[in-house]
Image: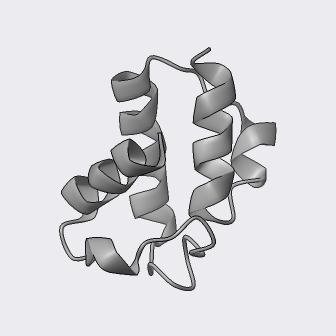
Amino acid sequence: MFENFKAFLVEELGRIDPDSITMESSLSGDLGINSLELADMIYNCESNYNVTIDDDSLKNFKTVGDVVRFLESATK
C-alpha cells in the first residue's frame, strides 16, 4: 500500500521527489501539502481507493504512514 500511495502522491502533487517520501514524512512539514491540496488529496483518495474518510480520521493524518495505515485498514 505504501508504494501505491507514494505513486498517488507524486501524481497528485507533481512536485514531490518520490525518493523523499517515507512512512514518517510529514504531510505538511516534509511534503509541503497545504490545506487545499490536502482537501483535493482526500477527495481523490476516496475515489481512487473507494473509501470514505471521515473528519475524525482526517484529523489523525499527520504523516504518510497515518494515511497508509488508514487505507490498509479501510480497504480490507
Q: Quadrant of the C terminus?
A: top right
Residue drawn at 76 percent across, 52 percent down: 59
Asked if residue 36 lies left or right of residue 12, the reply is: right
- Give above or below for 62 relative to 49: below
Asked whether the viewer can see residue 40, the reply is: no
Position of residue 56 measured from the top left corner of the image (x, y, whole percent):
81, 39
Position of residue 23 measured from the top left corner of the image (x, y, whole percent):
58, 64
Query: Going by the picture, which residue comes out furthest to the bottom?
Result: 29
Residue drawn at 59 percent across, 22 percent down: 52
Residue drawn at 44 percent across, 17 percent down: 50
Asked if residue 29 lies left or right of residue 32, the reply is: right
Position of residue 62 measured from the top left corner of the image (x, y, whole percent):
69, 65
Front residue of this view, candidates 38 and 51: 51
Asked whether the viewer can see residue 56, the reply is: yes
Position of residue 8 measured from the top left corner of the image (x, y, whole percent):
30, 48
- Give above or below for 34 relative to 4: below
- Give above or below for 74 relative to 28: above
- Colour setting: one colour
Residue drawn at 25 percent across, 54 percent down: 12
| Image mark count | 0
- Give above or below for 30 relative to 34: below
Q: Quadrant of residue 74?
A: top right
Asked if residue 69 lies left or right of residue 64, the reply is: right
